[in-house]
Image: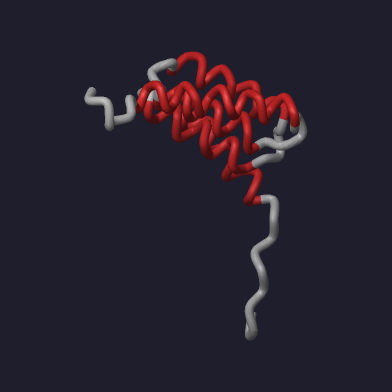
Amino acid sequence: IGSSQVDPYSALAGAAAAAADAQRQHPDDARFPRLRARALFDGGSRSDGLAVLEGAARTFPKDSNTLYQLADMYKDADRLPDAEKALRQLLSRHRAVPAPRTAGS
């Protein structure tokens, strides 16, 4: 890599560290563990990224974005049964919400 090019893995490691710091400062915000998990995962630390996101799914059980991202990362890790399980949880959560009524129905 030339001096003008950025190593993507270094950038992702920096992003993961920044997200971890933000997560410590804002422990009630589900966005930061999601960002940290994706940066770790895409930076080559797949198991660490999944562990962070699995923890976030336990900490924020009602956060649909976290569950959706977990399903996506499971898919990317070729853990298709786990991805399907996460998506089914997400769908069952949204089925409980009645569909809006339209005029004439």
The image position of residue 67, as x and y in percent, is 58, 36
Residue at 38% of width from left, 18% of height from top? 44
Q: Quadrant of the N terminus?
A: top left
59 vs 23, nearest the viewer: 23
Up the image or down, 1 lies above or below 34; here it is above
Residue 64, above or below 11: below
- Counting from the top left corner in percent of width and height, residue 38 is at 48, 30
Residue sitting nearer the eye, 22 or 81: 22
Q: Quadrant of the C terminus?
A: bottom right
- Identify the coloring: secondary structure
Give the x, y percent position of residue 18. 58, 27
Image vertical order of residue 99 relative to residue 91, above or below = below
Q: Is residue 52 left or right of residue 9?
A: right
Horizontal side, residue 13 vs residue 1: left or right: right
Q: Position of residue 16 (x, y in %)?
A: 53, 25
Q: Residue at x 63, y 50 (%)?
A: 94
* 41 to the left or right of 54: left
Left or right, 34 with respect to 27, comes to left
